[in-house]
Image (tube, rainbow, N blue to C red):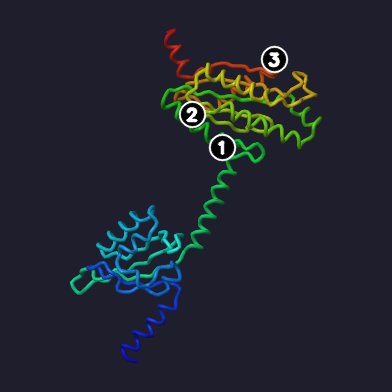
């Protein structure tokens, strides 16, 4: 088989594949060749691919600078490389392309040309995006209470640990609110679990409105209990937010005929603030707030009990002062 025949065979093979072959002369930055498949993929005529500039301008603006810089730097260094980008079609749409590039050097080791293949990876990208969306949803679901839409206990544990460490480092106050729906068992028994679930959703929404700052955290602690973590919040501000929680729930005007407190749904709250020292534990603080919630329920419900939790460092300071 002659060399001319070999070239014809290779050209036929290349042009019969879905991959689009191309070659660019390095010195002139012009296309020595591009496969005719480019027209069916992007709509641009084969003859319109004259220079590397045509390739660059037919690229999504958000991808262009990064991809061009990568290809130039890798090519200058004689390194084979790949690049993914969105290519503009003649119709004005975009198609995801993967360019696989091989750098050809001359006998002196100088870059002579670039040869490569373009692959349509649109379907692959669509699948990747779907998987990323699914992954984000799964991550969201893993930290979100499926019934109420607020964060779940797992997320609360993560947030409390993070904000606790931050408060220890910055010596800023951290406030915590634990609250419980008054006589919720009686509510469920009287209205049924479906309406009970709806009640929990409304309470979760009300609490989210009460804690509106970016770092304020609202979560479902378990059952009919909810929790709020309030970073950089002193006692006065914490009390204000707790009262706002009560008001928001009352404004829902959810009937509760079996409550001994009110004909409308109410909540009881335990509230505390601490500036944690290095020796303090978040679990001890949580337990202290839980005791305040218990006191609120013992003292008649539909109320809040509040106390400042003294850190160990403050106790030590007080002991030193007495000494």
Q: Extreme top residue here? A: 322
Tag 2 residue? 164
Q: Extreme right residue here? A: 190
Write down the quadrant of residue 130 in the picture.
Answer: bottom right
Query: Between marks 2 and 3, how big is the CA–CA gap?
Result: 30 Å
Tag 3 residue? 299
Q: Position of residue 148 (x, y in %)?
A: 65, 36
Q: Look at the picture and state if 51 lies above or below 189.
A: below
Q: Look at the picture and state if 201 lies above or below 279.
A: below
Q: If you read the primary sequence from the N terminus, does the residue marked by circle 2 or circle 1 appear first?
A: 1
Query: In the displayed structure, does residue 183 sit left or right of residue 114?
Result: right
Viewer-nearest residue: 263 or 141: 263
Residue plotted at (60% across, 40% down): 144
Query: In the displayed structure, does residue 75 sit left or right of residue 227?
Result: left
Q: Which mark is residue 311?
A: none
Q: Quarter of the image for the N terminus: give it.
A: bottom left
Query: Between marks 2 and 1, how big is the CA–CA gap?
Result: 14 Å
Marks 2,3: beta carbons within 8 A: no
Q: Position of residue 5 (x, y in %)?
A: 35, 89
Q: Extreme left residue here? A: 108
Q: Secondary structure at mark 2?
A: helix
Q: Secondary structure at mark 3?
A: loop
Q: Secondary structure at mark 1?
A: helix
Q: If you read the primary sequence from the N terminus, does the residue marked by circle 1 or circle 3 appear first?
A: 1
Write down the quadrant of residue 249 in the picture.
Answer: top right
Residue plotted at (38% across, 59% down): 59
Circle 2 residues within 10 Å: few <14, some 14–19, many ≥20: many
Residue plotted at (48% across, 19% down): 312
Query: Between marks 1 and 3, how big is the CA–CA gap?
Result: 31 Å
Q: Which mark is residue 155?
A: 1
Write down the quadrant of residue 113 in the picture.
Answer: bottom left
């Amino acid at each position: 088989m002659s060399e001319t025949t070999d070239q014809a065979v290779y050209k036929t093979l290349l042009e019969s594949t879905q991959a689009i072959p191309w070659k660019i002369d390095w010195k002139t930055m012009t296309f020595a060749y591009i496969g005719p498949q480019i027209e069916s993929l992007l709509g641009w005529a084969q003859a319109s691919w004259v220079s590397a500039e045509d390739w660059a301008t037919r690229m999504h603006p958000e991808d262009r600078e990064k991809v061009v810089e990568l290809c130039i730097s890798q090519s200058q260094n004689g390194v084979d490389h790949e690049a993914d980008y969105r290519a503009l079609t003649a119709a004005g749409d975009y198609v995801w392309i993967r360019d696989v590039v091989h750098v050809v050097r001359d006998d002196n080791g100088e870059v002579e040309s670039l040869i490569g293949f373009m692959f349509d990876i649109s379907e692959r990208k669509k699948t990747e995006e779907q998987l990323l969306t699914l992954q984000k949803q799964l991550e969201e679901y893993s930290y979100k209470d499926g019934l109420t839409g607020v964060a779940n206990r797992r997320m609360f544990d993560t947030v409390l640990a993070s904000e606790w460490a931050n408060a220890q480092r910055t010596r800023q106050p951290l406030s915590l609110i634990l609250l419980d729906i008054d006589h919720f068992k009686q509510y469920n028994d009287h209205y049924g679990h479906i309406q009970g679930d709806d009640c929990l959703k409304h309470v979760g929404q009300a609490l989210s409105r009460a804690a509106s700052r970016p770092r304020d955290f609202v979560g479902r602690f378990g059952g009919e209990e909810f929790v709020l973590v309030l970073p950089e919040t002193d006692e006065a501000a914490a009390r204000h937010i707790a009262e706002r929680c009560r008001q928001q729930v009352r404004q829902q005007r959810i009937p509760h005929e079996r409550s001994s407190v009110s004909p409308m749904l109410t909540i009881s709250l335990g509230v505390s603030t601490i500036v944690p020292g290095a020796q303090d534990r978040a679990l001890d603080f949580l337990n202290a707030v839980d005791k305040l919630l218990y006191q609120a329920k013992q003292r008649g419900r539909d109320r809040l009990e509040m106390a400042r939790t003294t850190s160990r460092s403050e106790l030590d300071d007080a002991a030193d002062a007495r000494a």
